[in-house]
Amino acid sequence: MSVRRLNHVVALAEEGSFARAAERVHLSQPALSRSIQAIEDELGLRLFDRAARGVAVTQAGKTIVERARRVLFEANCLVRDAELLKTHEIGEVRIGLGPYPATILLPDLLVGFARLHPNVGLKLELNHAHAMIDMLLAEQLDFIVIDKRVLPDNPALAIKPLRRHDGRWFGRAGHPLASREAVFAVDLRKFPLVTVPLPPFMHSAVHRLLKIRSHEKIPVQLECNDVRVLKSFVEQTDALLFATASSVHKELAARTLVPIAVKDAPRIGLAFALVVLADRTLSPAGEVALALAGQMLNDVNLDAVEPVK
Amino acid sequence: MSVRRLNHVVALAEEGSFARAAERVHLSQPALSRSIQAIEDELGLRLFDRAARGVAVTQAGKTIVERARRVLFEANCLVRDAELLKTHEIGEVRIGLGPYPATILLPDLLVGFARLHPNVGLKLELNHAHAMIDMLLAEQLDFIVIDKRVLPDNPALAIKPLRRHDGRWFGRAGHPLASREAVFAVDLRKFPLVTVPLPPFMHSAVHRLLKIRSHEKIPVQLECNDVRVLKSFVEQTDALLFATASSVHKELAARTLVPIAVKDAPRIGLAFALVVLADRTLSPAGEVALALAGQMLNDVNLDAVEPVK
DNA sequence: TATGCTTACGATGAGCGTAACTATG
DNA sequence: CATAGTTACGCTCATCGTAAGCATA
């Protein structure tokens, strides 16, 4: 039994004439006649009484026509949903973000995406890399944005690398180090340090930079996985923040934070990547969000030591 | 989009493998593969991700599969209803009965039919012929049972004549006329007469029978379209009832009413007929009720002047 | 190499339009 | 004879099964 056939039945019931119904369903009149005969045979029920003047629905036919309408309604819903999914007008996108990507992308990504596709639901997970990778593998997330160096070597994960974001040091406007001609790495240790929880490779890089002895820990005063917390702390104290310029570009623009240029510091980079499940198809809305996130992370002024507009 | 296709989609989603799903929908595995490709193309959406180990439903696919399930559910309902209609397990039968047919058929017809098809609704209309004919033409009734001589000459009505039921006279057990050797028509006039409202042809027949002058009316003491009312009245008085034997066969059997054999009375017959709309198909359950009514009206002991069992 | 999905190919039949037929007012 | 539905006929395309192809563990 085809949906097409049921449409023929409903059209004939509503038009009351084979000729008119045939026109409505874009069929020749004989073809419609056969189509109706076919479904009557298939169901073993006479649905219509043919008279010289018009066609009447039988009692049994009325029941079937009612049922047919409901099938057609559901079928139309399916087609409509397919269309909406394609045009990103329905659906749900679930994104996992690491601390820096979250700071860089939020809330611009959400606002931008919600403006483009207001009826697509967004679910955000801000968490540790390993927790998000587990969720991705369990198909609880569509994609995640983290530093690719923390990723396990799992062929189920497809990694789309993004441009490198350099880590830099930032202090409040008017910070003692801001007015210094030349700042060296050791100078940084005179001030409290704040940072997000650093993955091992970042931890050792900072450890080397600050020339801390191997058995000593980095003297971090405040560690928090929410960069906003760090930023507001640094704005009000003499503490120094290690972060990407991209994650503080708004504060740089507002001049509430300023970069501390360290003369003898090697570049410590963040290598963000978009991570999806290999061989799994994203929903169309998910593709859009993925592209948007990638674009925003690549387009942001990476080395903004001067205010951006 | 065919219901068949949607079934393929749901089967594949549930089985997680083309081979197993193909078996479930009785198709070769390549055929199923093409069928899925076809609907993916038709919707413009990838519904499944094929991997070496098994098949996974995409995010968009999950939405579509859910929709497909609902379409299939409605389609199954339709097929099921068609089956139930055919086996008289659902539906509604609407019957119009004239006074005598009602008395003869009720409640046996209802009980018998309800026993055969407990889930088919029954609607009864007990009314004047012209009202019921109007309802029949308006498709508010499936068929009516009345004297065919009251029917207008309307080609939209299809008439299935039944056996003739003779009208006779009845009185209470022990009625003065019951013990008389010979009763003549004029003797009837000594007693009150009760009857249902008589159609014109019956009225004039009775008028002639009782040898009433043309300008005089038939002296009817009680006229009621409910024969049961008439019967209980006659059982308790010396009134005489004009009715068909078939409509009082239970009272004859119980000997609460007895026939009054009139020597010089011509036979006055009731010509019942089943009336349906010409060229309109009854529901299967309606056909059964129609046949049952016709059978009961033809099988009843028409001339039962002696008790029936 | 075994497993599992896809592509190729030929055959079948469902479904279409045109045209001829039939019934009815 | 006009109107409306059905049957006849030939064609096309959707869909099938079998067999070969191809990717992956």
Image: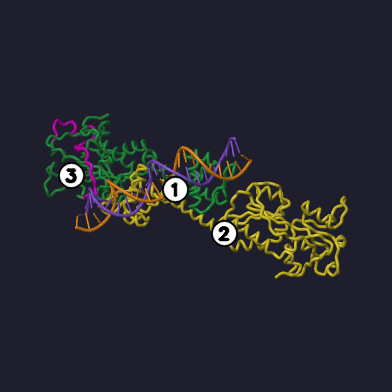
Chain colours: A green, B yellow, C orange, D purple
Is residue B28 among what the camera can see? Answer: yes
Residue B19 rendering spot, x and y as whole percentages: 31, 55
Badge 3: how crowded within 10 Å, few (<14), some, or many (20+)? Answer: some
3D distance between C-alphas at marks 2 and 1: 29 Å
Q: Amino acid at mark 2?
A: Asn
Residue bounds of the magenta highlight: A154-183
Q: What is the chain identity of the residue bearing mark 2?
A: B
Q: Which residue is mark 1?
A: A2
Q: Are marks 2 and 1 in contact (CB under 8 Å)?
A: no
Position of C6 compared to B99: left or right? left
A70 to B120, vertically: above or below: above
**Secondary structure beneath label 1:** loop
D19 to A284, vertically: above or below: below
Q: What is the chain identity of the residue bearing mark 1?
A: A
Is residue A239 among what the camera can see? Answer: no
Q: Amino acid at mark 3?
A: Met
Dot 3 or dot 1, earlier in sequence: 1
Give whichever of A268, A255 is nearer the camera: A268
Residue B303 rendering spot, x and y as whole percentages: 74, 65
Label 2 and label 3 in one chain? no
Name the residue: 78% across, 51% down. Answer: B200
Q: Amino acid at mark 1?
A: Ser
The numbered mark at residue B119 is: 2
Residue A130 in the magenta stretch? The answer is: no
Residue A172 in the magenta stretch? The answer is: yes
Q: Which residue is mark 3?
A: A202
**Secondary structure beneath label 3:** helix
